[in-house]
Every structure is written in structure tokens, then in C-alpha cells.
Amino acid sequence: MPYRARLGSETFRFDSLADLLAKATPLRSGDQLAGIAAHSTAQRVAARLALADLPLATFLQQPVVPDEADEVSRLIADSHDAAAFAPVAHLTVGALRDWLLGDAASTAALAALAPGLTPEMVAAVSKLMRNQDLIAVARKVRVVTRFRNTLGLPGTLAVRLQPNHPADHPAGIAASILDGLLYGAGDAVIGINPAADSVPALVDLLHLLDRLVQQHQIPTQTCVLTHVTNTLQAIDRGAPVDLVFQSIAGTQAANASFGINLPLLDEAHAAALSLKRGPLGDNCMYFETGQGSALSANAHHGVDQQTCEARAYAVARHFKPLLVNTVVGFIGPEYLYDGKQIIRAGLEDHFCGKLLGLPMGCDICYTNHAEADADDMDNLLVLLATAGLNFMMGVPGADDVMLNYQSTSFHDALFVRQLLGLRRAPEFEAWLQRQGLTDAQGRLRPAEALPALADGFAQLLQGPDA
């Protein structure tokens, strides 16, 4: 079905709902690469005018990727909650924007609405919003999850401690973990991207993380970010798996390029639940996403990369995850060209994920060949933390020596927590105080007052590989 909008003396035509969404999207290199971006500013404005007048119910009648060709589309349709949608069912996309920015859209109202929204609805309304709108609405949304601690509470910002090592050397990993703990990082998860992909090596890493956490009774969760099939094998071998990790995308074909489908994720979710390792809750999945993943797999079906990204959140939502992380600048400048595009994408992803009821974090990052730098990441960090981000990355020196990209550091987390008065997960913060690492206000204590945690780490690493 075509859509039309008149701008001045010119009438613009958009051939389908997917075309309308793509043309209304803020400029980004990925949509240009796909050949679906607006050809001019005038065409983009016209698309937004047409989109603003579109009834929300249209998205329930016209899937952007046909149901018969895509299990993600079927999941979106099957999981839609009509009763939750009812309060906004009469609205257009533009009217939804106005409602979201008004007082009626309280934290409680947005939580109740989440099951009634589809990814395409939230992607559509985000295209009509300025950055300040995305921040103002997302800040009202709170998504709380639990495993060994409680994440997402008001006034908190958690940190994933990312101790990657180019050779998976236990001593190098442990040193990075110790470094992060001394800076008060690690409450979201201690998560390793492994250099090796053999299951025995992954099992060794899982046991290493578990020993460190158990000996020091650290109230956090651990994860080795490997393919879900490897994690299933590790569980079969008795490995201490807290969280199951997987990268996901917004179409069935894109997920197939990752070697996954919904039944496989169901199997992994059930396996993790069966271990019952979370004393406070059973949110045991960790997903990562990123704008451009469907396009890079040639699996976008003509849908713009931001809408595809929002569709990935429908996959995540189905499994009630502890953490969802948009790795916003990692794929490269072919998809998000510069700092401005990365900042906008990060705010969009956080807004869309939160509206859909997800515990959104962000790897605020860029690759070295993108037109971006650390100042851009500082800007996005402050904007997202103001918007109520659940968690961020903590990488030694902000430079990941295994994945070769630029992220955020333990110092960055310390800065933004102090700037905005944000605390850590309460159970983790209490542990830091018991260890003498922080005072009652969550501030790091002077170096001479710190305990010798390093001795305990060294004892765990004694042996031929230490």
C-alpha cells in the first residue's frame, strides 16, 4: 500500500510501510548503503509528516516483514497484548509522541503499556523525536531485573566488567577483574569475550570466573560471551554457567546468519533456568544487538536498520533477560558513519528497548576507522546516563586489547556516577563497603585503606598457567 505526503508544491509517494519508515529515519550510512534512505531532506520531512498521521493499528495489520517468511514477525504478532495496547489504540504515531512526552505517560503507565507496543511502533515514534525527547521519555521507564543482585533501580548505573585478554590468559583476566573491582565496577556482570572458541577452554574460563566470585562472595553474575551452542555444551559438562549469552538480530534470516533460531534460544533458556544459580531472581539471559547486523547479513528485507534493531528487542523480550546491550558503534562506519550518527543511534536504541520493557545497556563505542572519538563517547555516556541507562561497559583504559575497538573505561563509569549521583546495584555496593573499597556514600576510599584482594586472586591463580 503506498503512502503520500504533500510538502509545499511537491507530493511524495512511499511505496510501502517499510519504505515510509526508512525514508523517515534520520540520516545514517547503513541505510544509504542499503539504498533505502531518503534522497533529500525534503523527502525525509515528507515521510515524517505521513508517518505522524499513520494510525498505530496499521502496524498490527501490515507487518514490515511478512509473517509467513519470518519467525520474528510471527513472535511479534503472537505476543502482542491487545489489552495493554488499548489505552493508545486510537492514536496515530504523532499522537503517541505527544502522549509519551506528557504527564499521563508515568513510569507505571509506561510499564503497563510495554506489552502492547510492537517494535515497529516504537521505532516509528522515535523517528519523530528529537534527542531530548528520546532522553525525556526513556528516563521515565524503569526495568528492574535480578540474578545475584538487583539491576535497574532508580538512581543506579551498573557496569559490565569486561576483562578480555588476547590469549585468554588467566593472570591477565584476573588482573583486569581486580582492576575493575578496585574501581567499583562489575555489578552488571563480569563478562569475558573469549579469544578461543573451544568448549574445554570456555569451561576453564567459566570455572575461573566462578572461583573468583565464590571465594570473595561477590554479589554479581559471570558470563563467557560465546555462541549459545557452546554454552549448552558447557552446561552439559557441568560448567558453572550463570548467564547464557547470544547476539541476536531482528529478522529470522539475520539470526540464521548467527546460527540461531527461536527454538534454540528456548532450549538454552530452559537449560540455564534448570541450574537455579540466581539466588535473587531468574533473569538468566544476556543479549547483544547492534544497528546494521541485519544489513551486514543481507537479511534486512528492505527495512531500515533502526527498525530491524527494534525488532531484535522483540526476540530479547520473549526471554526476560537480565541484560540487553546495544553495541552501538562496533560494526563500523559503513552503518553508523560518525559520532553524530552513533550518538543518535544509541539514544534511539535505549529509548526503543526501554519502551518495550527491556533492561537496556549500551556499549558506548567506536571502531578506529569511524569518524568518531572519545569526546563523542563522553557526550553519549552523559546523555544515556541521564536517560536512565541500566548499565555500561568497563574496559581497562577503554581500549579492548582483544576485540580492538574503543569503549568506556572504569574511570568513565566513576566519572558519570559521581557527576549524576548514581549508585551501584545495592547488594554490590554493600559488598564494596564490607571490603573497605568504598565509603558509605559509595566513594572510593584512599589507596592506603584498600584491602589486599590481590592476595586472594593470586592464590586462585597458582599453578603452571598462572
Image (cartoon, rainbow, N blue to C red):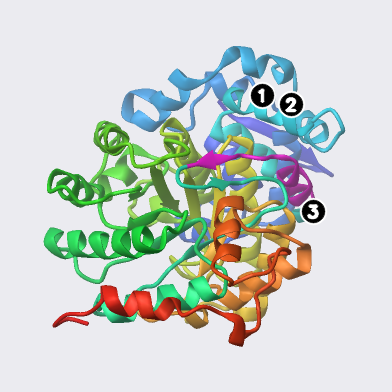
Q: From this viewpoint, is residue 424 visible?
A: yes
Label 3 element class: helix
Verify CB contact (< 8 Å) between mark 2 and mark 1: yes
Instruction: Name the residue beneath numbered marker 1.
Output: 112
Identify which residue is drawn at 25% across, 47% down: 228
Residue 267, percent from left and from top: 24, 33
Please name the amino acid that badge 2 sits on.
Ala
Instruction: Name the residue beneath numbered marker 3.
Output: 132
Identify which residue is drawn at 74% across, 46% down: 139
Is 422 displayed left or right of 191 in the figure?
A: right
Front one among 342 and 180? 180
Is 46 displayed left or right of 346 in the figure?
A: right
From which residue to which does the magenta span run? 132-146
* Mark 2, other Cα within 10 Å: few <14 / some 14–19 / many ≥20: some
Q: From this viewpoint, is residue 377 visible?
A: no
- Residue 281 on the magenta segment: no
Whole-number angstrom distance, CA of label 2 to CA of label 1? 5 Å
Mark 2 vs mark 3: which is more N-terminal? 2
Instruction: Name the residue beneath numbered marker 2.
Output: 109
Whole-number angstrom distance, CA of label 2 to CA of label 3? 20 Å
Q: Residue furthest bottom?
A: 448
